[in-house]
Amino acid sequence: MEKMLSAVTLAEKIKSKEIKVSEVIDFVENNVNRTDKVLNCYTVFDSQKARERAEVIQRKIDRGEVASPLAGIPIGIKDNICSKGELTTCSSKILSGFRPPYNATVIERLNDADMITLGKLNMDEFAMGSTTETSFYGPTKNPWDIQRVPGGSSGGSAAAVAGGEAVCAVGSATGGAIRQPAAFCGVTGLKPTYGSVSRYGLIAYASSLDQIGPLAQDALDAAAVYSVISGRDSTDGTSMEFTPLDYSAVESADVKGKKIGIPEQYFGDGLNSEVAQAVMSVAEVLESRGAIVERFQMPIAEYAIPTYYIIACAEACSNLSRFDGIKYGYSCESAEDLLDVYVKSRSEGFGYEVKKRIMLGNFVLSSGYYDAYYNKALQVKAQIISAFNEAFERYDMILGPVAPTTALKMGENLSNPLQMYLGDIYTVMINIAGLPSVSVPCGFDKSGLPIGAQIIGKPFGEEQILSAAHAFQLDTDHHLKRPKSPVADEKEG
Amino acid sequence: MEINKDLVIYLEKLARIELSESEKVKVEKELSEVLGYIDMLSELDTEGVEPASHSFPVNNVFREDVVTNGDSRASVLSNAPHSKDGCFKVPKTVE
């Protein structure tokens, strides 16, 4: 194997015995060994285990016993998804040493599909951040420019795919945490419909918003991985019954006659002009394939960020109360009594951003402020949902930018936290409404950094948005471009 | 909404978190900024709007009440910082 190929292409070559599973593992491991000391995508990389799995799967393939379309494909896993007996830390000190006693449903499904999990990918601590700089294990770097952030919180997942350290990856999104790093790193990321992928075994940040999804080399890879991990699961009470994705419908890339809406509010003052232009090129390509594009008003969009941060932090302060130094992870040894164990373990175990969000959550839920903040946010959530319902009476899909800018320099966001929150302006509303949205690379800015556009769908409209994304990728080559090796970059610098 | 020192101390208590002196100053400033921004929600008229908890209407999800995960006491306790006689061990709580 000489160069990275898409997961779907590789799987076909594995099936036709043109490439051995072990060669794919070798190729990825070689890349990790070469570049991960710079990029820092992985918190754990377990090639020994991957090799053993590869042998088992190769034997099955040789006997012709494999049905899964992605058999033999290695996949990286975000560090907040539980895998049995393997370190899973949410990139936090407070979960250092934690080895879950069970597999997340997503891991079970990847295993059942004869895919190979390849260790854990770096993230913002507890997924709280948009830069992967708040990780206890240090920041991940953007393979396109190692002075810049890869986005977050699934920054390790996006950078690994962009940098050739993974064929594909699984991330999670509470806000824009799949689409925004995908955009910053020039890969394709799918945030699926809430309830379509089981959250069992995903360490919770904000349960009403969290969703697992793929980061991949193109729309077809994202569709193939989504097919493997999605579906009703009785261990997640929010999991829904729905018609499985028809992969061949995605392949047909049919957008003829589809109506695509562009919210005016997504092209306001804060949007970088190069990003705006690149996003409009998606509209042009889809129009040339017979889609009908229209602009429309969506004033509620302005209120998405405050609503999101209230809901996310409120749920986080409740979800993260389980980290108490008693059941697992870090425990302060110098504590004097039980309360002291809780307070000291949490104070020493959580990073600053996590503590701040827990405190914000406690504030919006506290007596005297609950109605003005938390309850108000739930009312605005209802308004956001109905605004989308209205929009989808007229449109099949909604198109917009993923982020107002391309990847920022490291440190820029941490020094201005409100600015970091504002960077989520185009993504978080989709999580609030539970909708699917796919981020596709749609160009590069003057500095050569990737730009992403998102195509938002109706609930369980993954087939339509992935078809549109695939249609765009059939006519463009942004998704095929890869950064030059960051190791060479370092020598030059 | 302005966050002051007393409110930070109250929130630390609610969150079971103790901040260092420098973190306290930073949190006070940053939470004030974020809440200043969040306060824009008050200009939105939500009179009579029913708060939404779920994105989609899912009600009463039931399953059979049967044990499916077996006895995993040992593996659960293997992550505990301290355990004794098959239980989590905590500091003495009653005198």
Image (cartoon, rainbow, N blue to C red):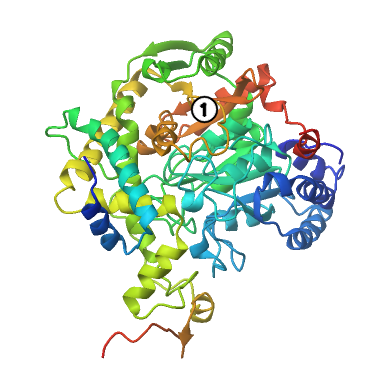
Specify the quadrant of the image occupied by residue A420: top left
At which x and y percent is residue A39? 68, 44
Tell me: residue A102, above or below residue A310: below
Q: At numbered mark 1, what does the secondary structure look like: helix, strand or loop?
A: helix
Q: Is A344 rendered above or below residue A413?
A: below
**Foreground of the two, A264 or A71:** A264
Type of amino acid at the residue the image marks with label 1: Ile
Q: Is residue A67 left or right of residue B83?
A: right
Does the rendering let one see residue B71?
no
In the depicted view, which residue is nearer to us: A300 or A17?
A300
Residue under label 1, please give it. A465
Q: Identify which residue is drawn at 46% across, 31% down.
A: A461
Q: Report x, y in % for residue A377.
A: 25, 39
In the rendered structure, the answer to whether residue A278 lies left or right of residue A305 reads right
Asked if residue A102 shows in the view, the reply is yes
User: Residue furthest toward the front?
Assistant: B21
Comparing A103 with A380, the one in front is: A380
| Picture quarter with the N terminus of chain A | top right
| Subunit ID for the residue under disc 1 | A
